[in-house]
């Protein structure tokens, strides 16, 4: 994993940018040359507007050019010119985006929360629960949740049941690394790259 300036990372020809929102809606809006006014006006809350603008500015900063984003029927984002596969995520004030010229990608960023210790049985099967500290290790739980979110963005509806359709194999938590998961019905395995610190958990996958 190669970390560059401005929270940029490159791996397997994928380019990732981690972006913290620290400006107002008006300040972010002014950074876009061609905002979609009709789409933006549908957003009611400042939170949604900040996320919307943050994603587009992050992608612009990553690629050096502003591109229009469209969504398929499942809500998956894509560039209208199909120049890159993309995936986006936001949590708290953090935005994460990834692009790849010809391979599918999935990304998820999460701000740490103790609430996940009360919810882990909803997204981990019984085997995973036993192998992943029985809900005691917060960092491990955050990584497992984020990994399944990232995989869902690649696989789609066939992975919507996180506990039964996706299986995470045992791993030890570090500040960064790779672990493996399987899509149960197809037996396809995926390598998931991660970065974890006090501010966020980030997991991404290149297929």
Image (cartoon, rainbow, N blue to C red):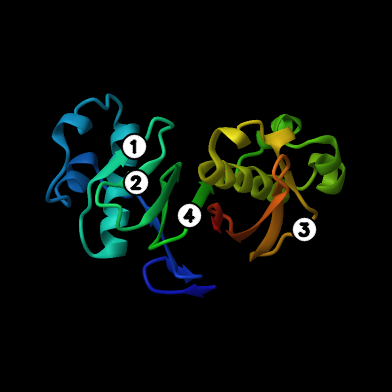
The quadrant holding residue 202 is: bottom right
Residue placed most toward the observer, 21 or 12: 12
Determine which of the numbered discs, if any, sits on residue 104 in the image: 4
Does residue 124 lie above or below 6 as drawn?
above
Q: Secondary structure at mark 1?
A: strand
Q: Residue at x 48, y 54 (%)?
A: 104
Q: Residue at x 34, y 46 (%)?
A: 78
Determine which of the numbered discs, if any, sits on residue 78 in the image: 2
Q: Mark 2 or mark 4: which comes first in sequence?
A: 2
Q: Secondary structure at mark 3?
A: loop
Residue 139 seen in the current view: yes
Q: CA distance from mark 2 to mark 4?
A: 11 Å
Q: Position of residue 81 (x, y in %)?
A: 24, 52
Determine which of the numbered discs, if any, sits on residue 71 in the image: 1
Q: CA distance from mark 1 to mark 2?
A: 6 Å
Q: CA distance from mark 2 to mark 3?
A: 32 Å
Q: Residue at x 32, y 63 (%)?
A: 62
Q: CA distance from mark 4 to mark 3?
A: 24 Å
CB of mark 1 within 8 Å of CB of mark 3? Answer: no
CB of mark 2 within 8 Å of CB of mark 3? Answer: no
Q: Position of residue 193 (x, y in %)?
A: 60, 61
Q: Secondary structure at mark 2?
A: strand
CB of mark 2 within 8 Å of CB of mark 4? Answer: no
Q: CA distance from mark 4 to mark 1?
A: 15 Å
Q: Secondary structure at mark 4?
A: loop
Does residue 5 lie above or below 101 as drawn?
below
Determine which of the numbered discs, if any, sits on residue 171 in the image: 3
Q: Mark 1 or mark 3: which comes first in sequence?
A: 1
């Amino acid at each position: 994993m190669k970390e560059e300036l401005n929270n940029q990372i490159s791996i397997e020809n994928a380019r990732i940018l981690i972006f913290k929102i620290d400006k107002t809606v008006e300040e972010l809006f002014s950074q876009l040359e061609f905002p979609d006014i009709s789409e933006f006006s549908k957003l009611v809350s400042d939170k949604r507007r900040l996320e919307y603008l943050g994603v587009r500015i992050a992608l612009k900063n990553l690629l050096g050019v502003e591109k229009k984003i469209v969504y398929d029927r499942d809500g998956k984002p894509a560039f209208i010119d199909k120049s890159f596969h993309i995936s986006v995520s936001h949590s708290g004030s953090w935005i994460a985006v990834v692009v790849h010229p010809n391979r599918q990608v999935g990304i998820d960023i999460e701000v740490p929360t103790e609430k996940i210790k009360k919810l882990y049985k909803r997204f981990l099967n019984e085997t995973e629960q036993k192998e992943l500290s029985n809900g005691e290790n917060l960092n491990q739980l955050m990584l497992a949740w984020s990994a399944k979110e990232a995989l869902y963005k690649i696989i789609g509806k066939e992975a919507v049941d996180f506990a039964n359709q996706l299986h995470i194999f045992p791993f030890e938590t570090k500040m960064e690394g790779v672990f493996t998961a399987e899509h149960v019905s197809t037996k396809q395995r995926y390598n998931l790259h991660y970065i974890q610190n006090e501010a966020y958990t980030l997991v991404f996958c290149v297929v």
